[in-house]
Amino acid sequence: MKLYTCTPNRDNPLRVYGLNPYYDGEGFSKCHKEILEKIPRVEGLGSRSCGGRICFRTNSKSITLRMTLKYVCYDIGMSTFACSSADVYIGPRPTAYFAGLLTPSGEMREKENVTAERTFYKSAEMEDITVMLPRNETLTAFSVEIEDEAELCAPTPYRNERPVVFYGSSITEGGCPTRIGCNYVSLLSNRLNIDVLNYGFSGNARGELQFADYIIEQNPSLFVYDYDHNAPTPQWLADTHAPFYHRIRKALPNLPIIMMTRPDFVCDEDAEQRRAIIRETYEDAVSMGDKLVRFINGRNFFPDQRRSECSVDTIHPNDTGFAMMADAVAPYIMEFLF
């Protein structure tokens, strides 16, 4: 058997997408340490491997994957399958099939330095493998073992050279589907074959201008933001939403920007106020001649007669809800990138 160890080095055929490219030796994190130091409230969440994907191609009929996690923690809203496991897909991304989970054993919960291992089987054809890393954990090591006579090479590139950036709440981060591949950002990445950066921070993305500057540094091909769930009050949202847009638009005048509101399951006065604030930012942008901005009303993600089927807690979508979100957002991305 031949063994390949993953590093963020672009010369490595095991390519890492969606994460900070500067591996610090402690784990594969989604954000650089400098931005986490500027915004301490996102330090823990930004150090995780959420949104990361490891991709490669191989013609090996058996593939043994091993990942080591810095820790495995309990999550009140999701099972180990959803928050601590990696999803493995085989085939070209738009039509890749879900081959199974790389998951820690049940007794490993609340433990540190946990290694999960599983062997997957496929045809002898050269095929793409996409491994979506766990939402809640930090990856510290990853390796692939293939048959001696087989080859392993770099993956088929994504459609977009520059990533689509998503910024928002725990919903953006991936709460709470049955597994990581079923949240709407992951669904869009696979369905549309697009590279993504998932800057969802549960309760902690609050429209800080320092993070707007960090997003600018990533040179995105398209930007989607919907952090209204995280804003402590409607006034906080009003004070930050338009400045966040203007900061990014000034630096990136040709960047398509999609402004979304949270996926509302219960319509109340607070939700209406927040939706109106985001719509006002959008309408002001249009009135100033911005033709690269779009607005999506999260209240419209789910049909009224099926709304109660789409959430686990009247806040976070389930698999059905996330699929409907992906269906609604995809046409806007395709308008600009396809």
Image: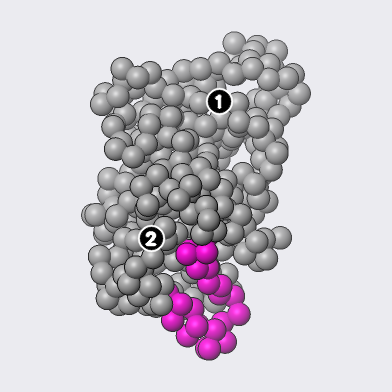
Q: Position of residue 254 (x, y in %)?
A: 58, 74
For image coordinates 43% across by 48% down, the residue present is 311
Screen quadrant of the N terminus: top right
For image coordinates 52% across by 52% down, the residue present is 306
The residues bearing labels 2 and 1 have C-alpha atoms spaced at a distance of 34 Å
Q: Secondary structure at mark 2?
A: loop
- Magenta range: 278-302
Marks 2 & 1, CB-CB < 8 Å contact: no
Q: Amino acid at mark 1?
A: Gly
Left or right, 188 with respect to 41, comes to right
Q: Is residue 292 above or below residue 34?
A: below
Left or right, 155 with respect to 172, comes to right
Q: Amino acid at mark 2?
A: Val
Mark 1 lies on residue = 100
For image coordinates 24% across by 54% down, the residue present is 41
Tell me the crowding category of disc 1: few under 14, some 14 to 19, or many 20 or more residues within 10 angstroms, Cα based: some
Q: Position of residue 39 (x, y in %)?
A: 26, 58
Q: Is residue 219 above or below residue 70?
A: below
Q: Is residue 135 above or below residue 336?
A: above
> Of the residues under marks 2 and 1, which one precedes in the sequence?
1
Mark 2 lies on residue = 266
In front: 199, or 302? 302
For image coordinates 48% across by 31% down, the residue present is 86
- Asked if residue 305 shows in the view, the reply is yes
Left or right, 328 with respect to 109, comes to right
Left or right, 186 with respect to 82, comes to right
- Residue 263 lies in what quarter of the image? bottom left
Tell me the crowding category of disc 2: few under 14, some 14 to 19, or many 20 or more residues within 10 angstroms, Cα based: few
